[in-house]
């Protein structure tokens, strides 16, 4: 056993040396991590034990809530539509002529049969007078031919009796018969000519009537394409007349909704512009069977009486169609719905804190959304003020009034020191003096967030110290410390401050995660503490 002892001692020394070397490497690594890592970076253990329920102090965020209660729900779908004239008719001449009268203008309301335009009728009047004169002479000629026919008709009867009694010869009778046939042929010819002349006269009368253009229905002039004195021809549009009562309201509906909409369903029509947002109830009167292959939409139509011409062609409107009515179901306002990580969710309040609930939605209306799952009767759903909430954040809750009039949410307790969109990311505040001889009102601190809104990473805040009396001293300096109230124990990188000029500074702070951040400022004048202030910055998700 003795020979093996030196070997065992050597092995033990090597083992101890290796352990010592590993310890040195471990200490070097630990020093490097602490020296070069982001001070706010968390290890695995830290991230596992971090208390994520610690949030902004109570009263930070005011919200409006609604207590979830089963109620009647009307599933409605809203589309943007357009008003179209019931009839939109071009007015054009049917004969050529000079436009001698055009007494209407766009916007004029005209009645059925009212004169809209008049053409020069001299030439057509002359033609009509000529046709009338020809017709009169033709009538005189036919009267003479009829008298001649009557004469020969009586003569042929007499000749028939005489030839039967052998008073006249057969040759004399045939001459009489020939005269009668000639008179009858002449009368028939005169009749044909008279009919042709009458037709020409009627045609000239109709063409003469075409020189007066009248309104085919009651409506409004929407276009005037020519002026008086212009030579117009058949088919040339002079005016355009629109029938506005009733008026058509048309909208293109999605292919997915096409099967839900039928003729006779209730609908509401409202204007998209103007101060009067009142909707008019009507019904769907037509569902066009053909679909637009490019947009995969189809047209639905509703008619409005529009007796006061409240709608005119081209008006953009909203067409809200009721597709289903449910007697008792859970629903929330559209304003309560939020999309988080591509999932539909709502915020609810429990014991004064906000919590995110993922939900499954069903039918929708333009005001409310049906909830299939994720919420229960009695839940306090946040309907306003949830835009920047974080899980577990403390809130102040208010409920809507009985008539659902909007409420002014309570003011944020830190509104004077928080850089937010509401104040354009710029605030002004007095310093909290640490010296009784230095009143609060002697110094004004202006803070402005550069490149808003704040993001995860480096952010810059420009500070300006302004004395209300005199000029700022050159020995001013500022110290800053950043904290996250929700994670007060977490190590946070210290902001860096650069003096741009006397009284103007730039603070660079690294916000390493979303949430509410506070930057505590201490202002020094030489070695004397001049005052303190705290800025708040919200970093959205």
Image (tube, helix red, strand yellow):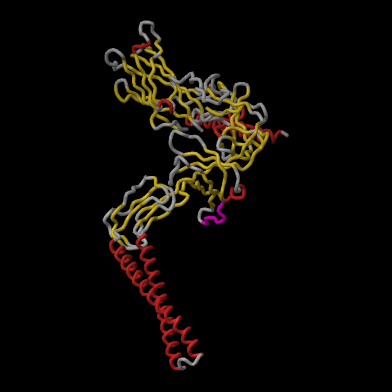
* Residue 497: percent from left, percent from top: 38, 24
- Residue 513 against residue 184 in the figure, above or below: above
- Residue 474 against residue 187 in the figure, above or below: above
Asked whether 18 or 468 is in front, the reply is 468
Q: Quadrant of the N terminus?
A: top right
Asked whether 429 or 96 is in front, the reply is 96
Asked whether 78 or 130 is in front, the reply is 130
Q: Quadrant of residue 362 in the image?
A: top right
Residue extending furthest toward the right: 1
Q: Which residues are magenta?
A: 287-293
| Viewer can see residue 50 | no
* Residue 520: percent from left, percent from top: 44, 19
Residue extending furthest toward the top: 437
Q: Is residue 475 magenta?
A: no
| Viewer can see residue 255 | yes
Q: Is residue 353 left or right of residue 495?
A: right
Please, what is the dominant secondary structure of the magenta stretch? strand
* Residue 412: percent from left, percent from top: 49, 20
Count of residue discs: 0
* Residue 394: percent from left, percent from top: 57, 22
């Amino acid at each position: 056993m003795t020979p093996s002892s030196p070997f065992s001692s050597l092995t033990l020394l090597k083992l101890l040396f290796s352990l010592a070397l590993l310890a040195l490497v471990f200490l070097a690594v630990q020093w490097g991590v602490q020296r070069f890592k982001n001070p706010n970076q968390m290890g695995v253990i830290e991230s596992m034990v971090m208390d994520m329920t610690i949030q902004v102090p109570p009263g930070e965020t005011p919200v409006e809530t609604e207590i979830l209660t089963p109620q009647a729900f009307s599933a409605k779908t809203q589309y943007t539509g357009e008003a179209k004239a019931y009839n939109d008719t071009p007015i054009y001449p049917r004969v050529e002529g000079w436009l001698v009268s055009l007494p209407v203008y766009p916007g004029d309301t005209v009645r059925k049969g009212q004169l809209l335009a008049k053409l020069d009728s001299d030439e057509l009047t002359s033609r009509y007078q000529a046709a009338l004169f020809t017709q009169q002479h033709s009538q005189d000629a036919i009267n003479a031919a009829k008298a001649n026919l009557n004469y020969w008709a009586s003569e042929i009867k007499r000749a028939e009796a005489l030839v039967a009694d052998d008073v006249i010869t057969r040759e004399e009778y045939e001459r009489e018969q020939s005269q009668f046939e000639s008179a009858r042929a002449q009368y028939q010819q005169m009749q044909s000519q008279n009919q042709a002349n009458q037709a020409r006269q009627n045609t000239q009368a109709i063409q003469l009537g075409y020189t007066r253009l009248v309104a085919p229905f009651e409506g409004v002039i929407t276009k005037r394409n020519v002026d008086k004195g212009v030579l117009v021809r058949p088919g040339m549009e002079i005016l355009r007349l629109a029938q506005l009562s009733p008026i058509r309201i048309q909208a293109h509906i999605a292919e997915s909704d096409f099967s839900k909409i039928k003729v006779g369903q209730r609908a509401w029509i409202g204007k998209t512009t103007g101060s009067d947002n009142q909707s008019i109830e009507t019904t769907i009167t037509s569902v066009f069977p053909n679909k637009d292959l490019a947009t995969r939409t189809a047209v639905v139509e509703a008619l409005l009486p529009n007796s006061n011409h409240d709608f005119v062609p081209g008006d953009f409107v909203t067409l809200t169609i009721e597709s289903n009515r449910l007697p008792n179901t859970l629903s929330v306002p559209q304003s309560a719905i939020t999309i988080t990580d591509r999932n539909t969710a709502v915020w609810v309040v429990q014991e004064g804190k906000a919590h995110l609930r993922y939900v499954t939605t069903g039918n929708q209306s333009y005001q409310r959304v049906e909830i299939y799952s994720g919420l229960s009767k009695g839940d306090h759903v946040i309907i306003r003020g949830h835009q920047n909430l974080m899980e577990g954040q403390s809130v102040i809750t208010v409920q809507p009034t009985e008539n659902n009039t909007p409420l002014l949410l309570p003011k944020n307790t830190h509104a004077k020191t928080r850089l937010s969109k509401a104040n354009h990311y710029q605030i002004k505040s007095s310093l909290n003096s640490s010296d009784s001889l230095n009143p609060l009102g002697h110094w004004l601190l202006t803070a402005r967030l550069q490149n808003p809104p704040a993001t995860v990473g480096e952010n810059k805040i420009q500070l300006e110290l302004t004395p209300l009396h005199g000029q700022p001293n050159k020995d001013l300096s500022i110290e800053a410390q950043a904290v996250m109230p929700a994670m007060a124990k977490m190590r946070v990188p210290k902001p860096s401050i650069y003096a741009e000029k006397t009284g103007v500074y730039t603070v660079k702070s690294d916000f390493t995660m979303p949430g509410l951040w506070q930057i505590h400022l201490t202002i020094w004048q030489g070695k004397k503490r001049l005052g303190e202030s705290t800025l708040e910055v919200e970093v959205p998700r």
